Image (cartoon, rainbow, N blue to C red):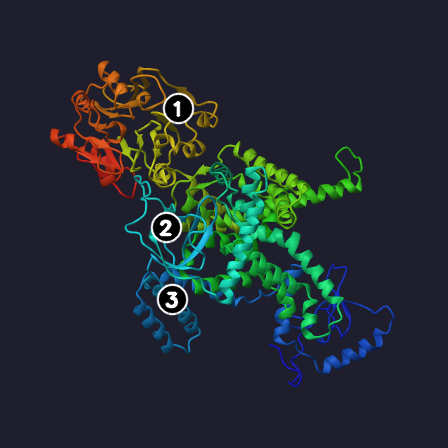
Amino acid sequence: MNRHAHDDAPEQLPRAPDEVLVPQGERVEGPGEESGGLLGSHGDQSLTGGPPLACKTRPRPDGAGAGRGRAGLARNQRRPRAVPPRVTERAADHDRAGDGRTGPRPRRPLLAVGAILAGGTLAGGIGSTAGWMVAGLACLLVWRSRAAPWLMLFCLAGLRSAATAVEPVDPTTGVWSELRHGEHTVGRLQSGGETWSVTPGLITPGERVRLLVAGPGVRAARGPVAPSTGGSVPRRLLPDQIQRLAPASERLPARLARAIAALRTTALERLEGLADPRTRGLCAALLLGERGALEPRLTDLFTRTGTRHVLAVSGLHVGLVALLFVWPAGSALAFCAARGRGRTLWWRALAAPEIWRALLLSLFAPLAGAAAPVVRASLALALGQLAPRLGGRRPDALSLWALAASVELLARPAALASPSLLLSYAATGGLICAGRGTVATLRGALPGGGRIAGVGRLGRRRPLWGRVLAQRLVDALSGGVGLSIAATLATLPFVWTRFGEWSWVGILLTPLMLPSLALLLLSGWLWLILPVGGLELLLDLGAAVLVAIAELGDSLPATPAPLPPRPFLLLAATCAGSLAWLGGVRRAGRASAVAWGLALLPWTRGPSGLEVWALDVGNGTAVCLRAPGEDCWLFDAGSRDRPGVARSALAPALAAWDVGALSVVLSHPHRDHDGALDWVVERYPPRTWAGALPPRLARRLPPAARRTDLLRGSLDLLRPAAEDGGLSLTLLRGKPGDGNEGSRSLEVGWAGERLLLCGDADADGLEALLARGELVGPHARLLLPHHGADSDWLGRLLVASDPRAVWVSASQRPPAADELERRGVPWSCTADAGPLLYSDPEPAAAASGAGGPKRLSSRPK
């Protein structure tokens, strides 16, 4: 325990023979060190407030320190000085952060505050507001306890979260704010709710409006398994559906927001001068956060390769802009201010580069779109570089991270469910906690510990310039890959559970993309300031290199790799153990390896019989089926009026079934039948492709995929091993052609039962099939052609196929419903019943391993 100078002298502790008491002003060295530091004026006490330092002494060069040293030693033996607690903590923190010496860990109360606020916010959805108020008052009864303030903080966070959840919000009235621009402006009300698409300039940002809309928006496609995240598509808003309540505010913040919006509009107009549309879209996304001009295929390319974060302005982009623009510009402005003649306090403050950098960062954030990651990163950089000047202390990254999280949770408790917030804070936390250890582990695994030797393997001495360049390259690559590994492992639990896919190649591509990304940012901002032809060439070069790197990664296998559902806690513990092992905790390696094996082993039991699902895709068709020992087969996948066929309907089912091999049958190349197959081909490369094959999909098929089709008649795709069992598939086609009448049908056989899945042929093509006797029943199920259209051949089809029940894939009551009811044929439509299931045997419906909305069609046997 430290004592002050006026207290009694403490008891002298015994010292080892090689220990000495160091007087003031002497330079000290630790064992084995080549340089030391001045002890200062703390007498013979160590910098950690403990016993005297055991160290070597270095006499002063002039020899004058000997006498003063003996005198100082005598004085210090009589009255030792103590180190103030604050100096002790700062010195210990300096030792740990500077040269890596062991010592007491710095206290981080903000980290505990952030954890308690996050726990209270999560628990706020469990109880009611009154219950949290009672819990908070109960903490006052035990206020003398040390845990009482923390419990009170936990209860306040829960109360804040519960109160926010029950606040009444009118989803149709509020202040309009714009999210992104493009052919249509996408925006939403500041009170929250769904997004809307309007004509540019129809609503002024900041204007208070009421939206005269009724009923829910467009329903997303549904499958047998409910998606982990619900995607939404902006609804179109017409002029007569907008009621203007109040004009935009004229206060200073509102006028500043409109000025920045006008500046962003001018910048977007200037980017329109770029000739290459790909470069134009990338610049708008990387500079201003406007991704509306990006082609969907280009966006999906970056998604597949695990580099989607490169397209979204985030902390990575803020750091690059700060390095390329903000830091040099701040230093230049401070230099100009320092050469001025002003000597006032304000003028001296302007001579500090940290002030200018903070101002430039505060201007950059709204220009880049003011998205939450941009604001967080800009504030963190501004506060971090201001901390030494304003507080006289070194900034602690983990404390800043916890402070930002605490402020954001207090301001918006609902943000804890935002993927952007979770991914941003997880990546930053992984870099802070495990970045350095991961880089050190990676370098240690390289030959020679990542050091370029002066002599090659053949005994020749390497030139100095070559060694320096090679060492810089190795350090940059190992550092970039190591940091990328740390950020990827920290975010993997959220990516796995929310998106259901992951691309390993993103770890390597992210550091490779940094030079081209820096070139695009540097040239792009210079182009906005002064558009000249040479900068456009640099922009085209940077865009071409960036896309080429993504395409190179996309050519590798498992980009992306679909992931089966796993518990979040298991994934979080596994990734935390891996980060701990990379950081030097070797005991965590074995447990982490066991957890990885548990997470990657198959958990899903295969089907016990045939399962056929007709997904709810509205005006479209998507049917998937599986049987024991066979591939999962997909018959069409598309829709005209339902978004999310791939992400919301197909992806959860295929992930829950842990599909190993997939085969596709396409009836005809129309968007309501093949719209989602681009996503399927990239994630689940088909083993067999039967039927129509559009050129855009043919280029993406694996070379080993089996391709088959027919002009007319029937073709056996799969034959059962035994006559009375096994899965059989037969492709049927009435006549050739790419339109509806040239579409194919698929007949499924299993255990003596048959199902008929029709395409869109309901006239000449259907007549040809009926004339050749290809559709003779009976059939357990019949999927009506052309989404239940009332065809002239409908009656003959029902008589020939003799179905026990009829399915219709449509978004409303089908025209054929009246004829079906007149004939007394049981029928079901996905518009009302949702996804439709046929299973044989019946218990397989309960043991299929799929969750979510399941609706069985009426199936008399």
Label 2 vs label 3: CA separation? 38 Å
Q: Label 1 amino acid?
A: Trp
Query: Which of the 4 image quadrants contains residue 35?
Result: bottom right
Q: Position of residue 628 (x, y in %)?
A: 30, 29
Q: Position of residue 170 (x, y in %)?
A: 32, 60
Mark 2 or mark 3: name the one nearer the start of the chain. 3
Instruction: Kindly identify which numbered label has been placed on residue 689.
Output: 1
Of tags 2 and 3, which is closer to the observer?
2
Instruction: Report helix, strand or loop for mark 2.
Output: helix
Total label count?
3
Q: Residues within 10 Å of mark 2 (few under 14, many from 20)?
A: few
Instruction: Kindly identify which numbered label has been placed on residue 160.
Output: 3
Q: Label 2 amino acid?
A: Pro
Mark 2, residue position? 239
User: Could you tell whether 774 is left or right of 326 in the image?
Assistant: left
Instruction: Please tell me whether residue 330 is drawn above or below residue 276 in the rendered image.
Output: below
Q: Position of residue 499 (x, y in %)?
A: 42, 44
Look at 39% across and 29% down and name the residue there. 661
Look at 79% across and 42% down and name the residue there. 464
Of tags 2 and 1, which is closer to the observer?
2
Q: Residues within 10 Å of mark 1 (few under 14, many from 20)?
A: many
Mark 2 or mark 1: name the one nearer the start of the chain. 2
Q: Is residue 451 visible?
A: no
Instruction: Kindly identify which numbered label has been placed on residue 288.
Output: none
User: Could you tell whether 233 is left or right of 99 in the image?
Assistant: left
Quadrant containing the C terminus in the rendered view: top left
Q: Label 3 amino acid?
A: Arg
Q: Residues within 10 Å of mark 3 (few under 14, many from 20)?
A: many
Mark 1 or mark 3: name the one nearer the start of the chain. 3
